[in-house]
Image (cartoon, helix red, strand yellow):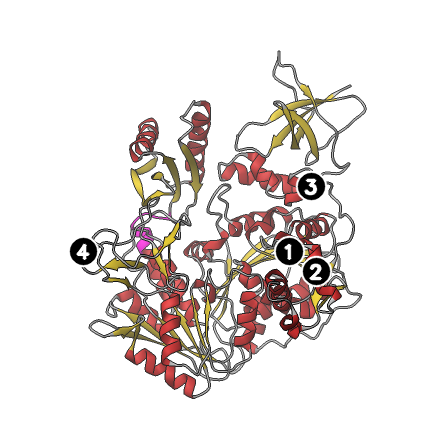
Amino acid sequence: MSQTVRVALNRPIRRLFDYWVPEGRQLCPGQRLRVPFGPRSAIGLVVETGVTPPPGLELKPAGAALENWPALPPETLELLSWAASYYQHPLGECLFMALPPALRRGQPAELTAPESFWQLIDVSGSTNLPANAHRQRELMEQLRLAEGPVPWSQLRQQGYTKAQLHSLGQKGLVRAAEKPAVNQLPSTTESNLPPLTGAQQEAFRALPQECGFSATLLYGITGSGKTELYLHYLQDRLEDAGQALVLVPEINLTPQTVARFRRYFGGRIVVWHSALNDRERLETWLRVRNGEPVILIGTRSAVLLPFTRLQAIIVDEEHDSSYKQGEGFRYSARDMAVFRAQRNHCPVILGSATPSLESLHNARTGKYTRVDLTERAGNATEPTISLLDIRSRPLEGGLSRPAIQAIGAALEARQQVLIYINRRGYSPVLMCFDCGHIAECPHCDTRLTYHRRDRALRCHHCDYQQPAFRHCPKCDSEACHPVGQGTERAEEVLATAFPATPVLRIDRDSTQRKGSIQSIISQVNEGNPCILVGTQMVAKGHDFHNITLVVVINADGGLFSVDFRAPEQMVQTLLQVSGRAGRGSLPGKVLIQTCHSDHPLLQSLAGGNYLAMAKQLLTERQESALPPFRAMAIVRAEAPSMEEALGFLDQIRQQLTDDAVEIWGPLPAALARKADRHRAQLILQADRRGHLNRVVSRLCADLDSRRLPTSLRWIIDIDPLETS
């Protein structure tokens, strides 16, 4: 007797498709198979078997299964089905997010022939290469910056050829190497973890001791040793055959976290992030799916992987906005980690020095248990935070004279300095001082950022780029000058002021090449005097023991934002970056430059008591009836014109007649035009989350049934982190 199955496809459509399975073959939920779809075939995932198809519908036959086992086991299928319903996103796209790219394309769920690896053996040999051998020199530099042997597939993706490798090999400059033994389980693991301090031992005893689900918010000030607690907890609680998931917010934090965990867990540690190539992702995915006793350290999407023996989940820097997907399937990895722990009957630990207001609220209402760690590890003490009022002060590259003097004093004492400025490029504006013309993006409602190093004007929203003008395109004046500060400008000013000291810049522009950020971090870790200039990439997670001074160039950005979350995010960022100071034996000092030193929030920040500030912000949220005290969703629309986007959202508003849902808008987004698309939004709020989700679900079903213009795009953002 033939079987009917319901299949999800990796398409932005909310419906599923029924196929009949020829006699003699049986399929189960979670299996991959190839199915006919229109004039072509597609890769599908079985969602349900034994389906009764609609009457009078002639079904097409399903193709053969690609494996005789489910790629997504039942628990993962349940997790993603819940997520698709909660976040109002097509199930097919959600399910395929749990597969590595190779399996999404229909490739076999197995590793092919072993990959070759290459390493550099003669660093100075590039001087003997012909003058025109530019690519070979670049290839040698790539191998030099790598932390170990580099796979051939990675070099191929970067445009290098086997001929270039063999040419360098014949000259004795590179050689084939053994694959790094980072994914092989060792027979023994190192057990001598660093001993816990008294405060850490007290916090460790408060962490969940029993099996089963529990959610714990670990509030640990910066430098208190939360990572040591994670290590001890996994060693003490994780069974030899068990799996664990450790989530980190960003790729640049992954290498150092992996290095610390590998010291004690060896090859049991595997990684997952977007910088891995397809083969590396498939290898890690197979180990997870096959139930190997791995501890996986990964970024956001790691929470979707098909674990089968998951016994513990840790979410580091749980407050970080990077855990919320910003496009497509807009899930929160932190919230999904909590749901996953509940379904897997295992503990989840959410760690942060600046917990999100949502997590603090959950701890206050009893959903989470809160554990506090309020002492820095070792001899380190919390840094002192001072507000430096820069009103009427002359600035050099954004730095005031007192700040420059403090930098000089720290360098004189052979210490390191961190300069935080959350704006890359040389300056945010290139302006004509005769007529006032400002360079603006032709495709977005924003100004072009001036990058002096390559004399370019760039849009950081749509990546539009044009040469910087020397003569004003409006009045032909030569009085065109940069206005404002960016990381490049701060780097230039500091290099001029302190010519004998290395100035290292970490931002998206300076760390594009693989291994570049690790090279900079290694240089800082040597402890020699230097100045580190960076954006939010340096604000969290890094443990630099000789940084004693942190200077924040401008702290006022979050004080007057239209986004109600901006004050929370500003306080979190400033306290996180402040926590980079004084992590060794020397005391730390933080100078926060501001034009509003009398602002109550900054005054509280100088006291360093995050919980007190969070309590005040929660009170304001409650009085304003905002999350986490109410549920929120945003309907976002994009169209060729603002009239079309607003008109579409206005129709939605008129049909939403539920009195229990409060509606704001429609109104243009803060960045109303991006990449020639006009953007608007409709904000929905309700006292009960379940009620709001039912309203939004009915709305999605209605919109799916309409024939909307192809030029119009809409999405639903559940629990949005940005409302501007």
Point 57% across, 61% down: residue? 514
Q: Is most of the magenta stretch helix, strand or loop?
A: loop
> Of the residues under marks 4 and 2, which one precedes in the sequence?
2
Give how far apart the Cα atoms at labels 2 and 1 are.
8 Å
* Place of residue 385 in the rendered image (x, y in percent of width and height, measured from the top left): 36, 75
Q: What mark, if any, has residue 643 been given in the picture?
A: none
Alpha carbon separation for disc pair 4 and 2: 55 Å
The dot on residue 73 is 3
Compared with 399, 668 (above or below) is above
The amino acid beneath tag 1 is Tyr
- Badge 3 crowding class, 10 Å Cα cut-off, few under 14, some 14 to 19, many 20 or more, is some
Neighbor class of circle 1 (other Cα within 10 Å; few <14, some 14-19, many 20+) is some
* Helix, strand or loop status at disc 3: loop
In three-dimensional space, the C-alpha distance between marks 1 and 3, rounded to whole angstroms, equals 39 Å
Secondary element under disc 2, as helix, strand or loop, is helix
Residue 485 occupies quadrant: bottom left
Q: Which numbered marker is on residue 435?
A: 4
Expressed as whole percent of the image width and height from the top left, the position of residue 694 reads: 45, 33
**Under tag 1, what secondary structure?**
loop
SS for callout 4: loop
| Residue 154 rendering spot, x and y as whole percentages | 65, 55
Q: Which one is earlier in the sequence, the residue at label 1 or at label 3?
A: 3
Amino acid marked by disc 2: Leu
Give the magenta range. Answer: 620-629
Label 4 – label 1 distance at C-alpha: 48 Å
Q: Is residue 58 visible?
A: yes
From the image, tell me which residue sits under label 1: 160
Asked if residue 623 is among those painted magenta in the image, a careful observer would answer yes
Question: In terms of depth relative to the viewer, which is nearer, 252 or 228?
Answer: 252
- Label 2, on which residue? 165
